[in-house]
Image (cartoon, helix red, strand yellow):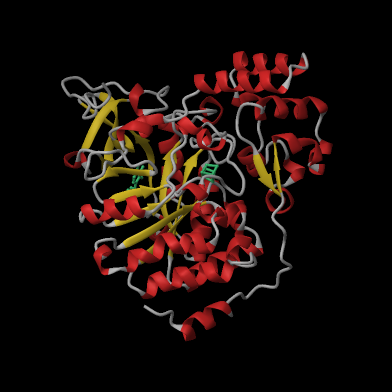
Amino acid sequence: MPLNSRSTRSLLHSVDFEYTPQRFTVYTARDLDRISQLDQLSAELRHEMKVVSSVLPFRVNDYVLSELIDWQRVPDDPIFQLTFPQRGMLSDVHYNRMDMALRSGMEKQGVRALANEIRAELNPHPAGQLDRNIPRDADGEPIQGLQHKYKETVLFFPSQGQTCHSYCTFCFRWAQFIGNKALRMATTGAERLYDYLRLHPEVTDLLVTGGDPMVMKSRQLKSYLEPLLHPEFSHIQTIRIGSKALTFWPQRFISDDDADELIELLHHLVLAGKHVAFMAHYNHWRELDTDIARAAIRRIRDTGAEIRSQGPLLAKINDNPDDWAKLWNEQVKLGIVPYYMFVERDTGARRYFEVPLYKAWRIYRDAMKQVSGLGRTARGPSMSAGPGKVEVQGVTEVNGERVFVLRFIQARDHDLVQKPFFARYDEKATWFDQLQPVQGQELPFAEALN
Ligand SMILES: *Cc1c(COP(=O)(O)O)cnc(C)c1O
Ligand code: SF4
């Protein structure tokens, strides 16, 4: 289908925002000394960052540094915690080993070997992602770069999208960023994706994810997505794009060289009858608070694409109801549909960010009380785990015993979807595998855990 030139032209004029194009400048672990904003911090704190960033991925760009982080509030600032390595993100044992190595002036190769050793002790691929959900082609060969866990949705990891404009300190995908090929999930060509989708008419949603697919050139993204407009893919109703670029680099939609081409592509997909859902990752209302972020949101919405928001609940970043209520209210105001509140998964710096389930539910509930029905579309707190997405629905009493009420929002076993079940109330539990059954009932995922 040809592009509708009139509506495209009006879209291109829809940048209702005065901007000076900003060059994308990125800083990684070896550039820590070049980040001038860090000069105000103590030498000790800066050393801690070096130790931690030798193990966990670190990457931040100028926009995050100059517009998102409030340096008056550092180190407590939520966006600083979101992007900068902190001492508590490693266990004492791991921290001390790397600290000693660096202080002793160990050469690069040794540091790298030690970092890999420590990383191997963290859990880079929770919920058996690497092996359990990889689909197979007609010959039974595994297809790298795809994941098919829930009947209707296929995840696609284009190889050019396996990085992000900045890294989140809690990211469970960190193994993909540290260059360990064996731990990486990515695909090179799209032919096998198309072959797979042809064989699977039950798939309605394709979720393009990463890393962040928005680090790709518009031209690349177009070459992946436009073929889906062919009638043989009419079963693909929805194209979802998982991204944090609206936070980390909204310039991608406004002033990057190929921003217009991207906007045209989204519009083209919408005109051709696809539901385009931009799955925006948000943790804090501050991410919505710059003019360019708002302009980017308007511009995406003008294409006819929807923006839905999801993000984890994290200690030190957003573990209070007021921030969530403000996040969801602002999103509704901007036309974004709140979608999921996640519980942080069992990986990497988890102890640093972990919030007990009972507290997560309280935060969710107290935030919900402060938003209108349009903000209550966010489901959660939800744990993405082996058997599915488990939501904590609440706390109540059954036969005099205090219990969590839970349900599967999504499940590998379709029959479990939306069935409520109970687990013993436990203020220490932070993840579903720590939950105990109530008397006389089994947890529905008991066998899936084995
Ligand atoms: C969350 C998730 C999806 C999408 O589930 P929805 O509930 O439809 O948003 C698909 N695949 C995996 C592996 C997921 O974790
Ligand atoms: S943007 Fe997403 S994939 Fe990238 S570091 Fe953050 S959480 Fe991970």
One can see residue 277 in this view = no
Q: Quadrant of residue 130?
A: top left
Q: Quadrant of residue 46?
A: top right
Q: In the visual, does 73 lie left or right of 389? A: right
Residue 97 on image: x %, y %:
65, 14
Q: Is residue 154 above or below residue 128?
A: below
Residue 309 on image: x %, y %:
46, 54
Q: In the visual, does 374 lie left or right of 138? A: right
Q: Quadrant of the C terminus?
A: top left
Which one is in front, 293 or 189?
A: 189
Q: Is residue 294 above or below residue 347?
A: below
Q: Quadrant of the N terminus?
A: bottom left
What residue do we see at 43% from left, 72% from top? Answer: 304
Number of numbered callouts drawn: 0
One can see residue 301 in this view = yes
Q: Is residue 352 above or below residue 232?
A: above
Q: In the visual, does 285 lie left or right of 345? A: right
Residue 394 on image: x %, y %:
33, 37
What residue do we see at 59% from left, 67% from top? Answer: 258
Which one is in front, 284 or 266?
A: 266
Which one is in front, 372 or 50?
A: 50
Which one is in front, 432 or 394?
A: 432
Direction front: furthest residue: 139
Residue 257 on image: x %, y %:
63, 66
